[in-house]
Image (cartoon, coloured by chain):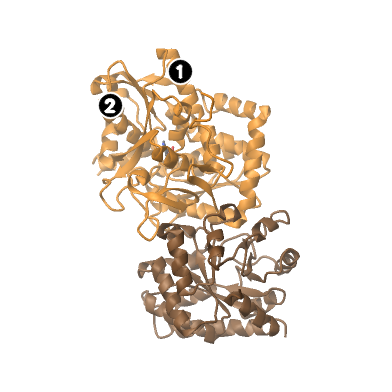
Amino acid sequence: MDGTNSLRNGPDEAGNFGQFGGRFVAETLMPLILDLEAHYRAAKLDPEFKAELSDLSINYAGRPSPLYYAKRITEQLGGAKVWFKREELNHTGSHKINNCLGQILLAKRMGKTRVIAETGAGQHGVATATVCAKFDLPCTIFMGATDVERQMPNVLRMKMLGAEVRPVTAGAGTLKDAMNEALRDWVTNVDTTYYLIGTAAGPHPYPEMVRDFQSVIGTELKEQFHKAEGKLPDAVVACVGGGSNAIGTFHAFLDDASVAIYGAEAGGHGIDVENGHAASMTGGRPGVLHGNRTYLLQDKDGQILEGHSISAGLDYPGVGPEHSFLHDTKRVTYAPITDNEALEAFQLCTKLEGIIPALESAHGLALLMKVAKTMGKDQSIVLCLSGRGDKDVESVGKYLGLLK
Amino acid sequence: MSTRIATRFAALKAQNRPALVAYVMAGDPDQATGQAILDMLPQAGADIIELGMPFSDPMADGVSVQRAGQRALAAGQTLRGVLAMVEDFRRKDTTTPIVLMGYYNPIYSMGVDAFLTAAVQAGVDGLIVVDLPPEEDDELCLPAMAVGINFIRLATPTTDDQRLPVVLNNTSGFVYYVSMNGVTGAAIKSRGAVGDAVARIKGHTDLPIVVGFGIKTADDAADIGRHADGIAVGSVLVDTVGNSLLDGKPTDKTVGALRDLVADLAAGVKRARA
Ligand SMILES: Cc1ncc(COP(=O)(O)O)c(C=O)c1O
């Protein structure tokens, strides 16, 4: 492939993936975003940066993460062979650390002395608090008040790691509101503060940069699968909140036409329930929020809806711009998974494989279960198991009636 | 073409005083009271009106403007409702400039062409859209200029001499200098720095410079207005609306409380250079 027709070349210089992306931010932030881009371009070319990131990935985060054949789920489904890319085994328990290690090195290079981040499930907050502890930078994590309640174990972890956790009560108290508040803090403290965005969304260059830091997932997966089976997988699947684990998984396969790619959106109570889901591509339309143009859940006047998902990490009315592009070009098939489907997949994975997945990842598994059944036994499908479910056991226990 | 904004600044220059730019949220606390507030502003002493277009996610605003927007949205405000208010105002006042201020998504959702056509018809003079920096000029700035609506840009303390020309290019009407790095409603840290910044920007443009963010009192208005061509006041105005409500509903004090405050601020700009 000569690259001219590649789907892997985005974004363009202005940060656009087709019509999506861009830099829709207040002027106060513009100089900083341009500066960040310049530093990122320089870092990418710097062998020292690469070496440091690689060393941290191996010795601190525990990469490469294993590729695991899920035999009992395969047998249960009776279709394609099912594999897990085990991102939940990374240090801090999810893929989020991949991005945090890259960005904290950038923050250091830029001479920033304080870090802020938004978090939904708390996994990104924990990963941020972790790298800030290691690199001795104070950090403030913005988290919706609803999420603080449903992801308490992660709130405690962040606090123990030395982070300040600021609950955000605006709106529904979920990820969107946390991001608004983080942006307000950033505008106020722009001279000193690095905003460590946790997903492949926001103003350019964040979607590209976060994707690059997460692409290690797909690159490793491709190599590991080739070693195991001598070919490409037939399908890959990931859950999509803002879309960082998904784009990290997909990117290496975008130009491999034989590989089907699936993204699971949060279908909540069902896609037909107004404001009852967080499936921005299936149930939304293009708009501009949080620095980028992308698919958004919004009313007819362009006011953003809160959405709903059982999973705090997917409970966001937008999605990264590259996914909007891949949705429009139909390279990736995005499908909604309801709360109940995710809960079922959560239990199946736990009972059959002895792996407790994050509720976010359980959405991906639920979609995989639908797809694998339609595939042949000689085919393979790989799930990015983006995180472990320790943070969710209390919430799920409540849903299942295990707690009074 | 002489616009309402240019005409107003020329008149104020002749009076040797800065403009009082008053920000209110359209339809706060409800459409009827919001209209009464808007209609009252010129007599109370506002020279230019900034009319907020409410948005669910006002990322550059502090709690005062956030709450005002929530009140307006809860009362059913829409972008078309905002334009209807301007149209109503224009039947009674053909000279006071109105600048709509807000975020891009409701405009994008309505469609830029449809929005601009309606805005021209309603009598809108300018737009301040916080999340459209020069890098996104193709979206709305250039189409707005083409139909004769001023696109007013924010310059901030982070806009250095190298970037200033980028920000000023395609800016028309006036330049809005944001007095600090922060959201609306925060406090100005250094008045001296604001004066220096205004002087710096004046070295790059002949457009009038309005300073906003953090101006709360008549003394602030007089002080900052000494060197600027205008001062913009918003958070204290919308707080005054909020504080006048009883169980979220307007009272007979709501419009009057705002009128008194605007009159006080107007006295401030009048003594700025006296
Ligand atoms: C385990 C896990 N997976 C997925 C996500 C969703 O984020 P993204 O779509 O950026 O991968 C989160 C977010 O909190 C998460 O914690």
Q: Could you tell whether A97 is left or right of B206 in the image?
A: left
Q: Could you tell whether A87 is left or right of A183 in the image?
A: left
A193, B272: nearer the viewer: B272
- The chain that hosts pointer 2 is A
Badge 2 is on which residue? A351
Note whether ligand 1 is within 8 Å of mark 1: no
Q: Relative to A231, does residue B63 appear above or below in the rendering?
A: below
Q: Position of residue A292 (x, y in %)?
A: 50, 49
Amino acid type of disc 2? Answer: Lys
Q: Relative to A236, does residue B260 appear above or below in the rendering?
A: below
What element does badge 1 sit on? helix
Amino acid type of disc 1? Answer: Gln
What hue does chain A carry in this figure? orange
The chain letter corresponding to brown is B
What element does badge 2 sit on? helix
Query: Would residue A283 be seen by someone viewing this image from the given angle?
Result: yes
Residue at point 44%, 15% (across, down):
A226
Ligand 1: give its quadrant. Answer: top left
What numbered label is drawn on residue A224?
1
